[in-house]
Amino acid sequence: MTRLVSLGVIIGLVAVFGLLSLRVMSSFMLPLLLAAMLVVVFGPLHRWVRDRVRGPEWLSAALTTAFILLLVLVPFFLLASRAGGDAVAMLRSPAGVKLDPTVLEGLVTTVNDATGLHLTAAQVNAEIRKLAEEWIGPIAAGAPVMIVKAIIGLIVMTVSLFFFLADGRRMIEAVTRLMPLDPRYQLQLLDEFQEVSRAVVSSTLLAATVQAALAGFGFYMAGLKGVFLLTILTFFGALIPFVGAASVWGTASLYLLFFVKDTWAAAGVAIWGATVVSTIDNVIKPIVLHGQSKLHPLLALLSVLGGVGALGPIGIFVGPIVVAFLQAALTMLQTELRLQTELGGMAASAPDSLPGPEVARRPSTG
């Protein structure tokens, strides 16, 4: 009885401190998850460096971490600087970014005739200015906090990446010793994490790249300036679910309609974006996730969308992993039930299979 009480207290302590630890670490879950995924993706590179660098484990981990940062950050800053140059050029252009009053007045007249309202161009401009202030104000006020959080997240991800590479084996061994689960099932979960991580990263980057290329083609055909800037914005927008490429090609379509006054180009960008650019994302991700993991294409798509809806941007990574773990857990349960059934059948048939005394007695050979 005392042992049962002690076991119950231990389980309660594990549950309480586990929830508290999850609460404390929740703000760092995304950097930690990204670091773990980078370890999976760049694992072959780290092994290659480790085999050729004759030195302590931390040295090969530091070299791999530095290479990953250069591979990710340098292109990012180069693309950002190029896109920023295009943005400055657009703002400094002689035409500027000004709405033609005749276009606005014509639109207001059309709306008044269709709805019976009595709007004026001045009222519409004032309302647009008010909405812009309401949207941009909080963003501008929260920008410093977001920048600080991004820097902290980058530091946490970098440090975690280094220690995962340097001490990953010992960490996994420590976790496997603490988990009350059969080692083969632990390896199965680890394999699932590796497969899904590679699939999620590759599907997300591939879908964003294809969307950006298709959108850039549409922007070029529509005669827009700053095609490179718009393409880069589409790529980063496509990485964020529910914001996506539509936030870029939709804005470009409105710009063509109200600023450039090119109705056909605006309609073309809108149709191209809605039917091709934003649709291809729902085709590429399920196919890649299904090809590199065991998830069904429909289940892969729902895991991404549902994960984002439940957890925010981190859900694009967590959703497929959770669904893959559930699938693996059900497979483990099925295996255990089958083993229990087989063991029960063997135990039931054991008395009948035992030889009787007359069978067990061997004839004398002497």
Image (cartoon, rainbow, N blue to C red):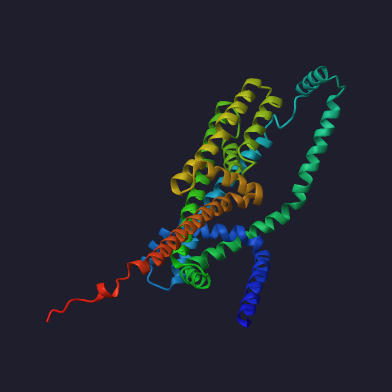
Residue 67 can be seen, yes or no: no
Q: Is residue 84 left or right of residue 192?
A: right
Number of numbered discs on residues: 0
Name the residue nearer the viewer: 138 or 363: 363
Q: Position of residue 234 (x, y in %)?
A: 59, 39
Who's the residue at 67% across and 33% down the image? 251
Position of the N terminus, as image quadrant, is bottom right
Q: Residue at x 44, y 45 (%)?
A: 291
Task: State whether residue 313 is above or below residue 352.
Answer: above
Measured as percent of width and height from the top left, residue 11 is found at 63, 73
> From the viewer's perspective, is 118 left or right of 324?
right
Q: Position of residue 325 (x, y in %)?
A: 52, 56
Q: Is residue 48 left or right of residue 235?
A: left
Residue 82: quadrant of the picture: top right
The answer to whether residue 277 is above or below residue 362 is: above
Q: Quadrant of the C terminus?
A: bottom left
Q: Nearer the viewer, residue 139 or 223?
A: 139
Q: Where on the picture, by quarter, is residue 252?
A: top right
Q: Is residue 101 left or right of residue 30?
A: right
Q: Residue furthest front?
A: 358
Q: Position of residue 194 (x, y in %)?
A: 47, 56
Could you tell me if residue 303 is visible in this image? yes
